[in-house]
Image: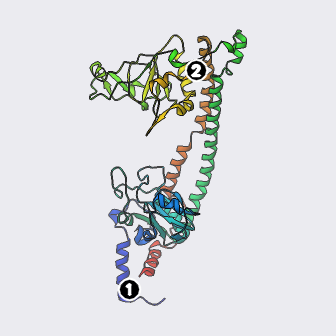
Amino acid sequence: MMKATKNEKLLLEKLLEKALVKEEDRPYKVPLNWVWTKLTSGFAKCLDNFREPINATERANREGDIPYYGATGQVGWIDDYLTDEQLVLVGEDGAPFFDLIKNKAYIIEGKAWVNNHAHILKSFYGTNGNKYLMYYLNTFDYRGYVNGTTRLKLTQSSMNCIPIPLPPLAEQLRIVVVIESLFKKLDSAKQLAQDAIDSFESRKASIMHKAFTGELTAKWRKENGVSLDEWEKTIIGNLCDCVVPGRDKPKSFTGTIPWITTPNIEGDYICTSSAKLLLTIEEVNEVRAKIIPIGSVIMSCVGRFGLSAIVENECVINQQLHAFLQSNLIVNKFLMYNIRYLKDYMSNKSTSTTIAYLNKTACNSLPINLPSLIEQSEIVRILEYTLENEQRAKELCDVIQKIDFIKKVILARAFRGELGTNDSQGESAMELLKEVLIEKM
């Protein structure tokens, strides 16, 4: 290699000054043989000039076999390509920048077309550099780098300044290998957990079907000399009164009567203590609402069909809920579980403009197979015992969110040099950075 001239040395120093992150701006400490550099000055090239948006109408006329990518992944197909190599894409807008778990960056391979909702990056350090970069961008804290209210945006100028810890090439490889090995094991565990949860949901649906078609209490009926023919086919409106909410949300909340909304339905019973909005009787009358008495069954009539619970304290409901008052013709828990069983039926019967909805008439018309009160109570008893055991099985597998969190912990440690892979006596990343900058001169 020829000896650098004085001008070349000065230029390299300027490039280094531009590429290195000032000490006071470094997010945290890294090993001594690593350096902090700015994303597009010392780690990757921005290739945003190779992206181009194509609207849905035009894409429909140009459908092909080339992936068309956006902020968080592939969004369609097209008949031509703008890039043909391994690249890293990170959202410009529309990405979940402030979500700890969700990814903001991903790798693409081969022929592709990228729209203007994603930035295109290519590491100066090859394939492993691309993988390292993707993992880093998926754990980076974007606060202070994205702006916007309804839709967060990572501008190119902000992206260029993102600080990234640069380890030597060998360490980049070791980090990627360890991350992928650990992620593979975690993904296997996650799949097992998901399979168990899917199995639980399938068994739960089967149990609910047996409960409301008579199969669950077949043995009980035989022991008690009861026939399935004694069940009555009817509708809920024939059994109990349906109460709808008032006309509008009250203007003020200054009392003690809970205003219940969908998020307050957390289990089998309404958690009135979690209601943050409390009304006076005058405020209730203002919107012509009715007090829902204890023992009533509340159900969602908008969007989330099947969501239901029993009222433990008097309350008022909002316009996404209906209530069935407790009746001596039907056990309230039997009704609550039956509503959950009918969620698919409700979805098919709902009216839909911007969101699916069931009016009072539709709610009253929900079909129900009605056994005697004694058998209703027996169905509830068996159902709750069976579902309780099934719930335990589900809880044993409810680790998916924890696995996603563990992945982020692994990434956080990786980019601090805490995976136990770094060779402090090995090459310095500063020399690696200088080589890259020299090539750019």
- The answer to which of 431 and 69 lies nearer the viewer is 69
Look at the image and tell me whether residue 422 can be seen. no
Nearer-N-terminus badge (1/2): 1
Report crowding for label 2: few under 14, some 14 to 19, many 20 or more residues within 10 A (C-alpha): many
Q: Secondary structure at mark 2?
A: strand
Q: How many numbered marks appear?
A: 2
Colouring scheme, one of rainbow, by chain, secondary structure, one colour: rainbow
- The spot of residue 297 in percent (x, y) is 48, 21
Q: Residue at x 34, y 63 (%)?
A: 25
Q: Which residue is mark 2?
A: 368
Q: Secondary structure at mark 1?
A: helix
Q: Is residue 4 left or right of residue 287?
A: right
What amino acid is labelled 1 in the image?
Answer: Glu
- The answer to which of 224 and 66 lies nearer the viewer is 66
Q: Where the C terminus falls, by quadrant?
A: bottom left
- The spot of residue 136 in percent (x, y) is 47, 60
| The disc label shown at residue 8, or none | 1
Q: Is residue 237 left or right of residue 378?
A: left
Q: Residue at x 58, y 27 (%)?
A: 341
Q: Is residue 143 above or below residue 170?
A: above
Q: Is residue 253 left or right of residue 73?
A: left
- The spot of residue 102 in percent (x, y) is 48, 51
Q: Is residue 15 above or below residue 299?
A: below
Q: Residue at x 33, y 50 (%)?
A: 149
| The disc label shown at residue 176, or none | none
Look at the image and tell me whether residue 222 can be seen. yes
Q: CA distance from mark 1 to mark 2?
A: 85 Å
- The spot of residue 338 in percent (x, y) is 56, 23
Q: Is residue 127 left or right of residue 137?
A: right
What amino acid is labelled 2 in the image?
Answer: Ile
Report crowding for label 1: few under 14, some 14 to 19, many 20 or more residues within 10 A (C-alpha): few
> Closer to us: mark 1 or mark 2?
2
